[in-house]
Amino acid sequence: MQNCIDINADVGEGLHNESELMPYISSCNIACGGHAGDVKTMRTVALLAKKNGVKIGAHPSFPDQKNFGRRPLDISSVSLFNSIKKQIIALIAVLDTEHLHLHHIKPHGALYNMAAVDEKIASVIIEVLKCLMLRVKLYVPYNSIIATLAIKNQIPIVYEAFADRNYNSNLTLVARTEPNALIDDANSMYEHVFNIITKEQVKTITGSFESIKADTFCVHGDTPKAYELLHALTTRLTHQGIKIR
């Protein structure tokens, strides 16, 4: 059993709840202009992360603030490449002014989900990292196309699972349009995460158990009761001897 995991949260998305979340996470993914975020919010959240000793990641998305980056966008590979690159550079510029370092990249929303199964989308993200020559980690789903491409291109990866989302049997996330997409009960969330940590299995929405690996777990900042869920999850994991860092 793992005795140490990372817990991350998507932040800088306009909810202004970062000060509540930061004490209970060990890494964060800062929106950098694609679906949300601007220079002011990036700086504010980065300084909160610094204060709480939280690792900082970029959270690029499809350039689609209208739909919060949660819908597939019909965009050329060149335009997507330029947008992702611009978003990451924007956050790095902010971090440089505060003498902070970028730890990881984690795509957001539809971009993340599509990169898991679509080689074209995944390749664009990989090419951005290669172009920028970033020595950072890439947060990816287990057994995904983007994970395979990252390994092939010698980009370090961190397998991620979602603490607040239910899974289909093919390890994709249950669509947010479905009523059972979210896990918003503290006991259910703990059992979900603890099962992945201890057994490397996830119980899917159909009741089957599928193999999965995760070194970091995400709780979305806009999940209802995110603070309460994070507090309960970290408390119970710590009592089991599992460190959050």
Image (tube, rainbow, N blue to C red):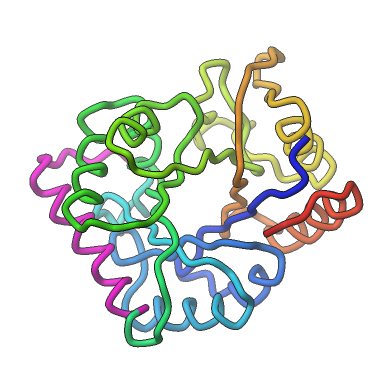
Residue 160 coordinates in the image, percent (x, y): 54, 40
Residue 177 vs 211, above or below: the answer is below
Question: Is residue 75 rendered to the left or right of residue 226?
Answer: left
Q: Residue furthest right?
A: 239
Quadrant location of residue 54? bottom right
Quadrant location of residue 74? top left
Predominant secondary structure in magenta? Answer: helix
Question: Is residue 211 rendered to the left or right of residue 170?
Answer: right
Task: Give the magenta range.
Answer: 71-95
Question: Is residue 94 rendered to the left or right of residue 181?
Answer: left
Residue 188 coordinates in the image, percent (x, y): 80, 37
Q: Residue at x 63, y 19 (%)?
A: 211
Tell me if residue 78 is in the magenta stretch: yes
Q: Give the camera-side residue of 162 and 198.
A: 198
Q: Residue at x 67, y 59 (%)?
A: 245
Residue 55 vs 96, above or below: the answer is above
Residue 79 coordinates in the image, percent (x, y): 10, 49
Q: Residue at x 66, y 55 (%)?
A: 224
Q: Residue furthest front?
A: 154
Q: Give the camera-side residue of 121 and 168.
A: 121
Q: Please count the marks in the image.
A: 0
